[in-house]
């Protein structure tokens, strides 16, 4: 037997590795850095969409898109350029803007995806969830939990616009998508007030609410009052006064895959940087300010969307003299329920990143 030289062994091993790959086998020893990483190799970047661009698109969609000719919804997703293949805002969540014109009904359907709506313009339109009409005013939040029938109607004289956020990219990742179109007669028959009279601080004694996740309406007035009541507290060093909307039955997040928050950054507030394993979407309600994400500065103002990928260093600042208020959506519940949650403060200097560049947002050209 001839002793194989190191050189020969290397060549033979390489041939062997390659042949394994041709036979749909991965030699762990040769691909270890691809299989595991010291830190997550996140495959998409932070991004921001300006209100001016979004307003133009809402306006033109309002003129060109006729729901009676099909299309199900007059909504459009804010899509991360690195996630076009899944139409994702993040890898787990999709945010959209939706316009419902006066007199219009967006037909009933249901899907596996959980959804929330956050009204940004108009008042008095409704979403019927399991037939229960939830009437909404500006900045109210409503939920459409998984597989619940929902249709939208606008009986008012003015258009309504809201933010939709859904977990359809997560479902796609799980290779799961179920959708069912409905007719008005089978879209549920719950009366107005069905949910609020069963999940409030006082509840009926002879019956319980039938679902695990209630389709609650969160009135902005209450949220705004709470933000104000807490404004002189220290708050979070990373997020200022950050309130989480809670599920009144299970406590915890509003939906199993999505958490919603109202955030107040007080005049002059500059938060410290941190990173988390969750991905996050911000919709700016009030104020002008900026966030630094992985060393890039994102300037934001009312009506802008921006998003933060998992494990990206991020910090928020409101250098102006007025309040900055954001509506925030994250996939934190996925991470916490699967024990994938981690969070880390920025370790260097005074807790702030160096800003290397400023993000240049697209305008409608
Ligand atoms: C959807 O079903 C709605 O029901 C809104 O209003 C936006 C975006 C992607 C997929 C489904 C709705 C959506 C959506």
Image (spheres, rainbow, N blue to C red):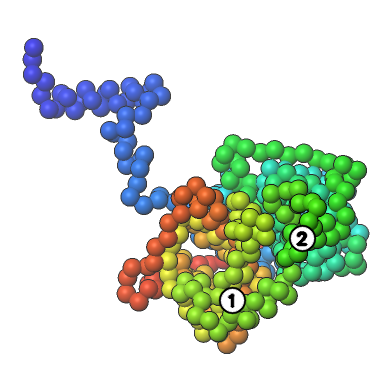
Q: Earlier in the sequence, mark 1 or mark 2?
A: 2
**Residue that mark 2 sits on:** 203
Query: How many numbered discs?
Result: 2
- Dot 2: element: loop
Name above or below for residue 175 compared with residue 362: above
Q: Residue furthest top?
A: 1
Q: Is residue 301 among what the camera can see?
A: no
The residue sitting at 63% across, 62% down in the picture is 246
8 with respect to 224 (left or right): left
Instruction: Decide which of 311, 8 is in the foreground and name it.
Output: 311
Under circle 1, the secondary element is: strand
Q: Quadrant of the C terminus?
A: bottom right
Which mark is on residue 264?
1
Q: Is residue 345 visible?
A: yes
Q: Are marks 1 and 2 in contact (CB under 8 Å)?
A: no
Q: Is mark 1 within 8 Å of ligand 1?
A: no
Percent position of residue 21, x then y: 36, 26
Q: Residue at x 90, y 66 (%)?
A: 156
Q: Residue at x 68, y 42 (%)?
A: 112
Extreme-bottom residue of the structure: 321
**Nearer mark to the viewer, of 1 and 2:** 2
Question: Percent from the top left, x then y, of residue 213?
Answer: 69, 52
Q: Disc 1 to disc 2, how far (Cα)? A: 32 Å
Q: Residues within 10 Å of mark 1 (few under 14, many from 20)?
A: many
Q: Quadrant of the N terminus?
A: top left
Viewer-proximal residue among 278 and 189: 189
């Amino acid at each position: 037997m001839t002793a194989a030289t190191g050189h020969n062994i290397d060549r033979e091993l390489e041939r062997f590795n390659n042949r394994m790959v041709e036979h749909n086998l991965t030699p762990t020893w040769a691909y270890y850095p691809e299989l595991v990483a010291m830190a997550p190799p996140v495959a998409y970047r932070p991004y921001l969409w300006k209100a001016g661009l979004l307003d133009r698109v809402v306006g033109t969609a309002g003129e060109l898109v006729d729901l009676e000719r099909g299309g199900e919804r007059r909504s459009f997703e804010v899509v991360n350029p690195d996630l076009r293949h899944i139409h994702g805002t993040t890898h787990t969540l999709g945010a959209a803007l939706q316009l419902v014109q006066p007199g219009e009904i967006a037909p009933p359907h249901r899907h596996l995806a959980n959804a929330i709506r956050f009204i940004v313009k108009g008042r008095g339109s409704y979403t019927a969830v399991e037939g229960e009409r939830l009437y909404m005013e500006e900045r109210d939040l409503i939920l459409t939990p998984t597989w619940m029938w929902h249709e939208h109607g606008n009986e008012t004289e003015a258009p309504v616009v809201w933010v939709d956020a859904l977990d359809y990219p997560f479902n796609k990742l799980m290779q799961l998508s179920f959708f069912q179109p409905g007719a008005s007669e089978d879209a549920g028959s719950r009366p107005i007030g069905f949910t609020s009279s069963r999940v409030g601080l006082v509840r009926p004694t002879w019956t319980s609410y039938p679902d695990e996740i209630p389709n609650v309406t969160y009135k902005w007035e209450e949220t705004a009052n709470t933000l104000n009541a807490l404004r002189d507290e220290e708050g979070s060093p990373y997020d200022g006064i950050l309130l989480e909307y809670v599920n009144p039955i299970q406590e915890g997040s509003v939906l199993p895959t999505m958490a919603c928050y109202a955030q107040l950054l007080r005049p002059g507030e500059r938060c410290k940087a941190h990173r988390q394993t969750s991905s996050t979407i911000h919709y700016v309600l009030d104020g002008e300010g900026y966030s630094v994400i992985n060393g890039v500065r994102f300037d934001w103002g009312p009506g802008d969307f921006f998003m933060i990928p998992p494990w990206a260093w991020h910090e928020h600042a409101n250098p102006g003299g007025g309040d900055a208020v954001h509506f925030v959506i994250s996939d934190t519940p996925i991470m916490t329920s699967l024990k994938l949650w981690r969070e880390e403060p920025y370790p260097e200097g005074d807790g702030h990143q160096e800003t290397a560049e400023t993000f240049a947002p697209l305008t409608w050209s």
